Amino acid sequence: MPVTSQPASYAPSEFQTGLYDCFGDCSTCCYGFFCFPCLSCSVANAMDECCLCGCNVAIRGVYRTKYNLQGSLCKDFFAYMFCTPCAICQLKRDIDLRKQQRIF
């Protein structure tokens, strides 16, 4: 019998919140805008990455790949280029939602 899916693989999907969905989680957005380095370190720690490297396009790419989220490095780059705090906040919101769903 052929294997059609890998263990712990995820169906293709989008981020669970939009890039600018700050009003859905005001505390994360305030955290991101007023203490961006702390939020970046929190996201990096959640993903078992080094805080000193900070959150960047590569971490977002790793996260998208792990959870089979649609997008591209080019889109990630532009998200960081035009609104870095929004991109990090979106990543943090998605991590928090996946923790609640017990799939993180």
Image: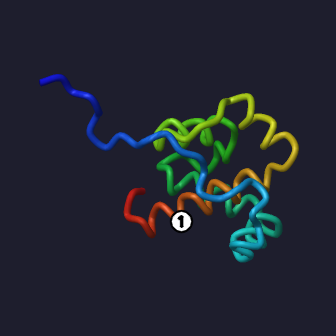
Q: Residue at x 54, y 43 (%)?
A: 63
Q: Is residue 102 left or right of residue 60?
A: left
Q: Say few, some or many: other residues with alpha carbon within 10 Å of mark 1 (under 14 / 14 to 19 / 20 or more).
A: some
Residue on which the image places disc 1: 96
Farthest-out residue, right: 82
Q: Is residue 40 left or right of residue 99?
A: right
* Circle 1: residue type: Asp
Farthest-out residue, front: 1
As drawn, 4 above or below 90: above
As drawn, 58 above or below 36: above
Q: Residue at x 65, y 59 (%)?
A: 17
> Please, which colouring scheme is shown?
rainbow
Q: Is residue 81 left or right of residue 76?
A: right
Q: Residue at x 64, y 47 (%)?
A: 52
What kind of element bears circle 1? helix
For the N terminus, the image quarter is: top left
Q: Nearer the viewer, residue 86 or 17?
A: 17
Please state the horizontal and vertical placement of residue 104, each as a whole percent of the image: 42, 56
Q: Nearer the viewer, residue 70 or 37?
A: 70
Q: Nearer the viewer, residue 49 or 10?
A: 10
